[in-house]
Image (cartoon, rainbow, N blue to C red):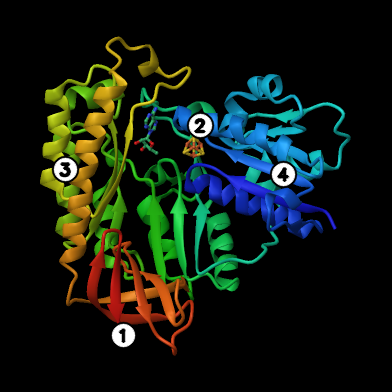
């Protein structure tokens, strides 16, 4: 029995790719190892969004070599594989296979070949991956991801993604519908559609845009909840806002990265919108779906960011009021425009700004959750909790909620009254 272990780094798109690689391996007779040390094949699905993520890969690669009792076949996939395959071969010459994010369908074939030299495929061609990956699925959970679009044509000046996942590519409606049905057949009840710019989705053949896709798939029997991530503010259309009002399974939650509240910084980031446009999109979504919850991403310390520019971010946060958010210190990435910009910001200043922003965002999350005390929410139960009879689920607004019940099971939907809030989750009573 040949055992494999996949270590995943980075975003949901990588989680999806790891799952598809696991499916390919299990359908060919390999089995999943529960420990990295047990594996005959060790796959590192890497991320390079910030420099910390790719440093982590290199240190884990070094450790993999030292720790194992076996000498596993080592595979590096994902964004670092795409961008730094030569550096991987130089710094980790024991790596056997390197596959970019659009080349993971070669995995089985490459595993069957001799490994006397490192096998590399980093084509950046997104058109073949989905067609070539085997489509027999191993087990699925109640809530799963479905990649509908990859790559990015926007070229934000801080971002490495256009170099790691290539140009925008949308899968056909037909292919998405078929995969969605299969997920539901495997017990999935909540699906999150994925794309780097999910709402710029377009199927040219059937002339279907993102709002059209949502409308088409929303009525799939057995689909209880539909989500999507990550949206670009530029592509929030009135039709999408309307979909949030009209489609019952579309959850009242949107991850809408703003990155900065300063027009000068947004322009230098090449984000294709300004603060007023972002605020207009927020207002439009709220007009159609007043209870919609907002989440966002922020970068502090972008080159040239002054205290005043940073205060514009703070004031935007105060205006929007986010239900949750992620924030990062700017990290210069190779080949990106911002890495070469003058006035790079000191790490100390970045840390201080990050601290200020995170304190504010955490308080907003607490305030957002506190409004729910005493309210009834619909809960989809996703997994067992830490203690006996405890179950963990999710509200329509994306909050984790813990309830106690001996009658309910994973996959059930129930109504709970929120009795308490913790910093990042709710406590509910049936
Ligand atoms: N430095 C810091 N954060 C970054 N992000 C993307 N590139 C960088 C970078 N170079 C953040 C953005 C994006 C999220 C996925 O990661 O906020 O929305
Ligand atoms: Fe990391 Fe971006 Fe690649 Fe996702 S797409 S794995 S976040 S670099």
Q: Is residue 258 above or below residue 132?
A: above
Q: Position of residue 40 (x, y in %)?
A: 79, 47
- Contact between labelled residues 3 and 1, with CB atoms less than 8 Å apart: no
Mark 2 = which residue?
A: 48
Q: Characterize the local packing of mark 4: few (<14), some (14-19) or many (20 or more) Cα atoms within 10 angstroms.
A: many
Q: Which of 418 and 176 is in front in this view?
A: 418
Q: How far apart are marks 1 and 4 (CA)?
A: 43 Å
Q: Earlier in the sequence, mark 2 or mark 1?
A: 2
Q: Characterize the local packing of mark 2: few (<14), some (14-19) or many (20 or more) Cα atoms within 10 angstroms.
A: many
In this picture, residue 77 sits left or right of residue 224: right
- Residue depicted at 73% across the width and 28% down the height: 120
Please tell me in which quarter of the rendered image ligand 1 is found.
top left
In this picture, residue 422 sits left or right of residue 22: left
Q: Nearer the viewer, residue 256 or 420?
A: 420
Residue 398 visible in image: yes
Image quadrant where residue 87 sits: top right
Q: Characterize the local packing of mark 3: few (<14), some (14-19) or many (20 or more) Cα atoms within 10 angstroms.
A: some
Q: Position of residue 94 (x, y in %)?
A: 76, 29
Q: Characterize the local packing of mark 1: few (<14), some (14-19) or many (20 or more) Cα atoms within 10 angstroms.
A: few
- Contact between labelled residues 1 and 2, with CB atoms less than 8 Å apart: no
Mark 3 = which residue?
A: 317
- Contact between labelled residues 2 and 3, with CB atoms less than 8 Å apart: no
Dividing the image into 4 quarters, which one contains the C terminus? bottom left
Mark 4 = which residue?
A: 42
Q: Earlier in the sequence, mark 4 or mark 2?
A: 4
Mark 1 = which residue?
A: 430
Q: Say which mark, if any, is on residue 209.
A: none
């Amino acid at each position: 029995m040949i055992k494999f272990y996949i270590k995943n780094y980075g975003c949901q798109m990588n989680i999806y790719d790891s799952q598809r690689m696991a499916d390919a391996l299990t359908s060919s007779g390999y089995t999943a190892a529960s420990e990295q040390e047990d594996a005959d094949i060790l796959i590192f699905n890497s991320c390079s969004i910030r420099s910390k993520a790719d440093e982590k890969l290199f240190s884990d690669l070094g450790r993999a070599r030292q720790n194992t009792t076996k000498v596993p076949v080592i595979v590096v996939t994902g964004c670092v594989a795409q961008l730094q395959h030569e550096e991987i071969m130089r710094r980790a010459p024991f790596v056997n296979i390197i596959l970019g994010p659009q080349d993971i369908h070669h995995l089985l074939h490459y595993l069957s070949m001799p490994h006397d030299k490192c096998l590399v495929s980093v084509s950046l061609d997104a058109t073949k991956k989905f067609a070539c990956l085997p489509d027999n699925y191993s087990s699925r959970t109640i809530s799963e991801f479905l990649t509908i679009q990859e790559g990015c044509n926007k070229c934000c000046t801080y971002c490495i993604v256009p170099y790691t996942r290539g140009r925008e590519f949308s899968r056909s409606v037909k292919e998405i519908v078929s995969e969605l049905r299969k997920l539901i057949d495997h017990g999935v009840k909540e699906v999150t559609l994925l794309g780097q710019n999910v709402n710029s989705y377009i199927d040219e053949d059937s002339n279907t845009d993102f709002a059209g896709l949502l409308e088409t798939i929303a009525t799939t029997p057995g689909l209880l909840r539909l989500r999507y991530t990550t949206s670009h503010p530029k592509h929030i259309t009135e039709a999408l806002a309307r979909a949030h009002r009209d489609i019952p399974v579309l959850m009242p939650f949107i991850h809408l990265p703003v990155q900065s509240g300063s027009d000068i910084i947004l322009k230098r980031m090449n984000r294709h919108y300004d603060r007023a446009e972002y605020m207009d999109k927020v207002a439009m979504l709220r007009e159609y779906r007043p209870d919609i919850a907002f989440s966002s991403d922020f970068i502090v310390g972008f080159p040239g960011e002054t205290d005043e520019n940073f205060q514009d971010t703070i004031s935007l946060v105060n205006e929007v009021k986010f239900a949750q958010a992620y924030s990062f210190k700017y990290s210069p990435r190779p080949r990106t425009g911002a890495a070469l910009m003058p006035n790079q910001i000191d790490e100390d200043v970045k840390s201080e700004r990050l601290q200020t922003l995170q304190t504010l965002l955490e308080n907003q999350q607490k305030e957002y959750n506190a409004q729910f005390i005493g309210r009834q929410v619909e809960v989809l139960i996703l997994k067992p909790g830490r203690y006996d009879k405890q179950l963990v689920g999710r509200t329509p607004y994306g909050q984790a909620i813990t309830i106690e019940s001996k009658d309910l099971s994973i996959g059930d939907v129930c109504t709970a009254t929120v009795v308490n809030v913790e910093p990042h989750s709710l406590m509910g009573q049936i």
